Amino acid sequence: MSGRVSHPIVDTTRGDGRVACLTFDDGPDPTDTPRLLDVLRRHRVSAVFCLVGDQVDAHPEIVRRIVADGHTLGNHSMHHDDMGNWTPERIAADLRETDAAIRRAVPDARIGYFRAPYGSWGQSPAVAASLGLRSLGWRLAITDWEPPGTDELVRRLLDGVTPGAVVLLHDGGGDRSQTVDAVDRVIPLLRADHWRFTLPERPR
Ligand SMILES: [Zn+2]
């Protein structure tokens, strides 16, 4: 390679106007992810699941359901390590290992995106691009990991969403029942206000 190559981090949706994309990190979780999938199915919303390899290995059947339900997959690293100071070689090894874990669960899985744990990107966007993964950031994070209560999560979503925003949420890494409940409530509220749900800008 020669010269500087830009590897932008996508944080916007495809489509214009009142569109938003829901993304869920740190799963699959054996309790909250199936509940979330039920909610998304009932509301007919497609989302992005940024999966952690260790969780994929522990719960491959949930990954199969995520794919069967038509959602989009992202690579969220093998062990949820902070890669901010890692060499490109170390990052590449981790991302390949994570893709392999996902494909042990779903052999023909399409993995379009990569999201760095903690948003600590370091050199990962270029590495992800070399592996065919588009780096996926976010415009809105509501710190659902606190967790502050379902009412507060709903308020943060309604107040914070902006046209074209990729929204960061979590279905793993702890008790995410409030997140699932908030998503269940906020989808019809936003739809009543003429919002639609879509996916991020397309992987290249
Ligand atoms: Zn994460």
Image (cartoon, helix red, strand yellow):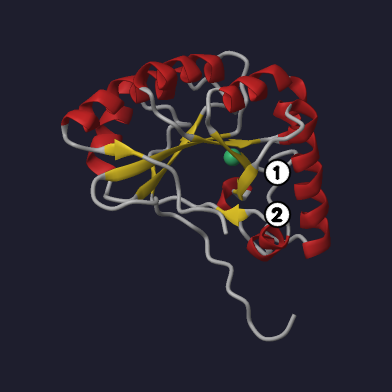
Of badges 1 and 2, nearer the viewer stands 1
Which residue is at a point 48% across and 31% down the rendered structure image? 145
**What percent of the width, then of the height, locates residue 130?**
72, 62
Q: Judge whether 83 appears above or below 168 on screen.
A: below
Return the mark for residue 77: 1
Which residue is at a point 18% across and 36% down the rendered structure image? 194
- Per the image, label 1 sits on a secondary structure element best described as loop
Residue 187 seen by the camera: yes
**What percent of the width, then of the height, locates residue 159?**
23, 40
In the picture provided, is 72 more to the left or to the right than 123? left
Which amino acid type corresponds to the residue marked 2 in the rendered image? Met
- Per the image, label 2 sits on a secondary structure element best described as loop
Q: Which residue is mark 2?
A: 83
Which amino acid type corresponds to the residue marked 1 in the rendered image? Ser
In the picture provided, is 36 more to the left or to the right than 148? right
Q: Quadrant of ligand 1?
A: top right
In the picture provided, is 10 more to the left or to the right than 191? right
Return the mark for residue 188: none
Q: Are marks 1 and 2 in contact (CB under 8 Å)?
A: yes
Residue positioned most to the front: 108
Image quarter (top left, top right, bottom left or bottom right) of the C terminus: bottom right
Residue 149 seen by the camera: no
